[in-house]
Amino acid sequence: MVCGIGIDMVDIDEFERLIKRLGRCFIERTFTEKEVELSKQTTEPIRFLAERFATKEAVFKAVAHLTKAKTFDFRIVETLNQEDGNPYIHINDSLQQIVDEGGICNLMVSLTNEKNYSIAFVIAKGPTNR
């Protein structure tokens, strides 16, 4: 059963201006160390981080409404890639608490880029008998 859906689109040029304006502080308060490390290994680190930012926003939209606090720290959402390149949301202990509270069993993500935009779509799935 679908408990929540979230979608977000990031304008990559606008995102780059944001990073230049807010600098390292924004990156450290938004992304995990692993996401920052992986971005440095790509030919387009800004696009990579924009995808991850869109995912964080989409997860927030799909999940936060199911929790008592209605909010959470974006750094608990970490998007990685499987060996075949497909993205997935790594469920660490902090995110596990959030998904448990929301009755979520699985978070599914799809990412795409079109010209100057990164888009993330997230489905929060719960138990089928819910």
Image (cartoon, helix red, strand yellow):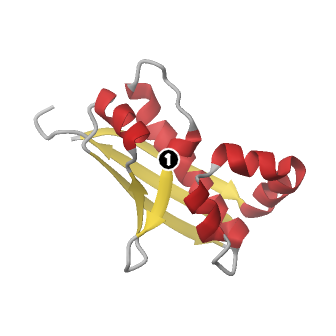
Q: Is residue 99 left or right of residue 27?
A: left
Q: Is residue 48 left or right of residue 62?
A: right
Q: What kind of element bears circle 1?
A: loop
Q: In which quarter of the image is the N terminus?
A: top left
85 vs 13: above or below: below
Read off the residue under disc 1.
77
4 vs 38: above or below: above
Q: In this view, does 113 lie to the left or right of 92?
A: right
102 vs 41: above or below: above
Amino acid type at mark 1? Val
Identify the residue at the far top of this view.
68
The picture quadrant where one finds residue 29 is top right
Give percent across and percent down for residue 93: 38, 41
Decide if residue 90 is in sight here.
yes
| Residue at image location 46% in from the left, 54% down from the top | 121
Closest to the observer, 86 or 96: 96
Give percent across and percent down for residue 123: 36, 48
| Residue at image location 49% in from the left, 38% down from the top | 61
Q: In which quarter of the image is the C terminus?
A: top left
